[in-house]
Image (spheres, helix red, strand yellow):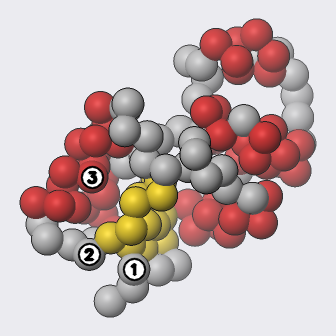
Amino acid sequence: MSEIIIYHNGRCSKSRGALEILQEKGVPHEVRYYLMEPLSKAELKRLLKKLGMKAEEIVRKSETLYKEEYKDKKLTNEEWIAVLAEHPILIERPIVENGDKAVVARPPEKVLEIL
């Protein structure tokens, strides 16, 4: 079985919920604290491909930084990737990756779709 990676923010209840599901199910996983260890542009591109999403679709639009700096901007996918690499707080959470698939686990039970 592939190694499952949860891109985790311990301050987020949804992220904690997804992590709890993995732990309760006894699923081996790696926790990546993406705020402390930001994803590179290449990692973001790879993850977006697995999600089947564009970068703007995983932007947290409720964040103050988004509202103040990016709300009315029309950026390309590459530009959004650069923004997310520079400001990981804007990445929706949690994202759970399993092999060639990934899911934004909102609600946390969505993690079950890729186990």
Quadrant of image for the N terminus: bottom left
Circle 1 is placed at which residue position? Answer: 3
**Residue 45 found in image quarter:** bottom right
Task: Check disc 3: other Cα within 10 Å, few if <14, some if 14-19, many if 20+.
Answer: many
Residue 19 is marked as 3
Relative to 81, 8 lies left or right: left
Quadrant of image for the C terminus: bottom left
**x, y (%) of residue 42?**
77, 66
Task: Check disc 2: other Cα within 10 Å, few if <14, some if 14-19, many if 20+.
Answer: few
Regarding residue 89, the answer to whether it shows in the image is: yes
Circle 2 is placed at which residue position? Answer: 28
**x, y (%) of residue 52?**
60, 61
- What's the amino acid at mark 2? Pro
Regarding residue 106, the answer to whether it shows in the image is: no
Q: Judge by depth and name the residue closer to the eye, 51 or 38.
A: 38
Task: Check disc 1: other Cα within 10 Å, few if <14, some if 14-19, many if 20+.
Answer: few
- What's the amino acid at mark 3? Leu
**x, y (%) of residue 51?**
55, 61
- What's the amino acid at mark 1? Glu
Cα separation between marks 2 and 1:
7 Å
Whichever of callouts 3 and 2 sits on the residue coming sooner in the sequence is 3
Q: Residue furthest left?
A: 24
Labelled pair 3, 2 in contact (Cβ < 8 Å): no
